Amino acid sequence: MTIVDSIIKALQHLAAISLPPGQGPGPVGRNPPQGYLWEKNGITYTFASISEMEHWLDDLLDYLPDKPTDRFVFAPAELVMCHTDLAPQNILRLGDGQLALLDWGSAGFYPPVFEIYAFRTCVDREPIFTQILSRFPQEEYYKEQIQLLANIEYILMKYGDTINL
């Protein structure tokens, strides 16, 4: 099994983890999201539902000078466990060939496009992620959502703690 196959298998395993009762989008235990998308220190907001997260993200898009007409639309059944920080230093191959995933600080239950977006942010630095991305859906829906997530990351990096939603 190649490293790409092993990573895909690990991601499929994560996506099969059942959503805990009462869990909204974000880290287990309803803590505020942290990581690549949420500004370097994370945000202080927690989400009770997908629609609440969609509205919060859509409100952030208003910070752009040219506001996109597309908005976030995630299906309610789309929350899956995502690692969202699978950089090479966070993947350890064990002696028996299995993988151990490290650094779970950014993990949580998110729509699958969040994991895809995380890989896209690594492609330029780590070519292996191009191979991984080729195994994910390439539908127009994902392309639109990925662009919106890129806008969110830009807004949070630019304005950070000055945003008050």
Image: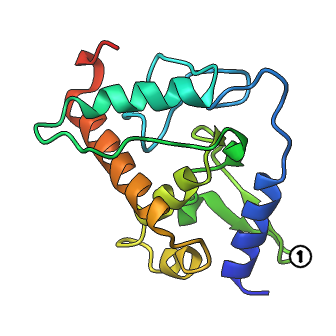
Q: Secondary structure at mark 1?
A: loop
- In the rendered image, is residue 63 in sight? yes
Residue 58 against residue 45 in the figure, above or below: below
Is residue 1 placed above or below 102 in the rendered structure?
below
Q: Residue furthest bottom?
A: 1
Which residue shows up at 50% across the image and 42% down it?
A: 73
Q: Residue lying at the far top in this picture: please name it.
A: 164
- Judging depth in this view, the residue of 79 and 74 nearest the camera is 74
Taking 89 as reference, is 79 above or below it?
Answer: above
Q: Residue at x 83, y 30 (%)?
A: 20
Q: Is residue 6 above or below residue 61?
A: below
Mark 1 is surrounded, within 10 Å at the Cα level, by few (under 14), some (14 to 19) or many (20 or more) other residues, namely few
* Residue topped by disc 1: 96
Please state the horizontal and vertical placement of residue 7, each as a whole percent of the image. 70, 70
Task: Tell me: 103 left or right of 117.
Answer: right
Q: Quadrant of residue 124?
A: bottom left
At label 1, the amino acid type is Asp
Location of the N terminus by quadrant is: bottom right
Residue 159, given in percent of the width and then of the height, sits at: 21, 27
Question: Can residue 41 be seen?
Answer: no
> Where, by quadrant of the figure, is residue 136 drawn?
bottom right
For the C terminus, the image quarter is top left
- Between 22 and 122, the one nearer to me in the picture: 22
